[in-house]
Image (cartoon, rainbow, N blue to C red):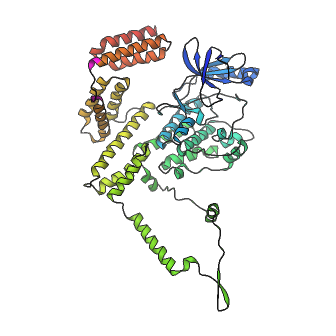
Amino acid sequence: MTRSRIGPLALESPLGDRGSNIYRALHMQQKAQVAVRVFSVPMGMTPEAKQEFAEQLESLKALRHPGIVRCYGGGFDAKDAYLVYELVDGDSLDIALKKRERLPWESVLDIGLQLCEALQESHNAGWIHGRIRLDKVILSKDGTKVKLCDFRRGPVSPVPLSAEQLAYSAPETFAEKPKIDAASDLYSVGAVLYHAMTGESPFVAPNPSLMKQAIRENVVSPVATLVFDCPVWLSSIVEQLMNKDPLKRPYSATATALALHEAQRRANAGMGVAEHALSGFSPLQMNTDRAEAAKALGHKKKKKKWRILDGDEQEAPGLLERPLVLLGLLAATICLITYLVWPPGEKTLRARAEVLIARDDLGSHNEARDKYLYNLIERFPDGENSRWAKEQLDLIEMENAESRIQSNRRFGREPSSEGERKYSEASRYELFGDRVTALEQYQGIVNLLKDEEKERAYVNLARRQIAKIQSKPPSIEELRRFLREKLDQADKMYSSADAIGAKQIWESIVNLYNGNKEMLPIVEQAQAKLSKLRN
């Protein structure tokens, strides 16, 4: 597109791949950055489409949820129609997977939770998405927040979908009378989670027609057979979401969210791969047709050889009938059983744990904890690697504690313990940039909770942050200078029409420092700014 303006918007760079119809734009009057989706001539010129577009616009503007990209409105110009959305700082899920191939199951579980919570809101408001796929899921830059984009009704694009785009669609959407409802949205969520965990599209086909056939007829392998560290309960949820029969999928987005919350609870409780086996799951328990496998591997069936004995033709003894072969197989079986049953030594346990710990994902670290570190400490309490194993356990529990904090903060849940509450409070100050108050809060956690074994992870996190801050100690004057800089930053944002950003800074100063006598003048300035803004 060569045009640079549409309505009150100045179009800047495209967002997404080449040929995208979504642009970064600047609202000329409000001086605010937004994203705008432009629809081509059929959308802009057809009177019926115009009427339908106008009718749904107000409803779309009212659809508000932290997990849904907000629509500010839209309109028409001489050629096209357009919708204006909030500009999200992050990448779509398809771009994230191009960078990393696949995501850890813990991250995917979080993505699924946020998608379901967004769909709860939209379905309750009467909005079915109908086109959920990787490029409609936006991840924040730190990967912790998820937003679902592109809610709209009707055939808003004359361009047919490619096979790759169809791969996440429910089979009933291809029926003679297509059915697009909450169940089809849930199927698409399952397909997106499947791809994110396995790194593979659930279905692959060279053209749309064959893709539709594959979706209707083929069954995907369970995630847990492809990603061995994926909990069996999470794999089962994805499998249920992708059931061909809509009636066999979860009843609603709310029901799916509850199931995912339960999976998250089990994960936070530390249930790892060992529990998968106890629950009856094994990725090795798969039926295989030997003849089919041999054919696939290119093995040819050998003709039987015959020998002549006493003038009669007789079949030669099979390989497994020969005594030496049988003895060899028996010896090999005994060796294999001994190897599998004989417990690994201390050095082997450490080496196997190190392989998993070297991976950059919490799931592998938890697997190292469950399978090797606990085992190493229990069997070799006085061994040379026992201290190392305890240090690794502390680090892994700290990672799990941070993951719980992020998850609870993201979903607005209350902290699960006093240690989590106090650490979350202290980290808010540090994130805001106030190292002075953060240091005091972290030291308070250590002094108060150091003897509480259940709060050990949060105490260790606090000690880590204390050491980090004390490597370059802050002062009260530094805090004053920092808060004055924040006030200046808010004034500049307000002057450049970013009233929301300025308001957030002023509110943070009031909420964090109201009651701090040394910072009282700065708090009063922030309160005055807020009062002026309200008036």
Magenta span = 469-477
* Residue 476 shown in magenta: yes
Of the pair 103 and 238, the residue shown nearer to us = 103
Q: Viewed as shown, does residue 311 lie left or right of 473?
A: right
Q: Position of residue 109 (x, y in %)?
A: 49, 40
Query: Can residue 430 be spotted in the picture?
Result: yes
The image quarter containing residue 161 is top right
Residue farthest along the front direction in this orientation:
2
Q: Is residue 261 above or below residue 91?
A: below
The image quarter containing residue 471 is top left
Q: Viewed as shown, does residue 355 lie left or right of 238?
A: left
Query: Can residue 255 be spotted in the picture?
Result: no
| Quadrant of the snapshot with the N terminus | top right
> What residue is drawn where x is 30% and y is 57%?
379
> What residue is drawn where x is 44% and y is 12%?
492
Q: Position of residue 366 (x, y in %)?
A: 40, 47
Q: Position of residue 428 (x, y in %)?
A: 36, 26
Q: Is residue 94 above or below residue 231?
A: above
* Residue 447 shown in magenta: no
> What residue is drawn where x is 24% and y is 55%?
382
> What residue is drawn where x is 35% and y is 29%?
427
Residue farthest along the bottom direction in this orientation:
310
Q: Position of residue 144 (x, y in %)?
A: 47, 33
Number of numbered discs on residues: 0
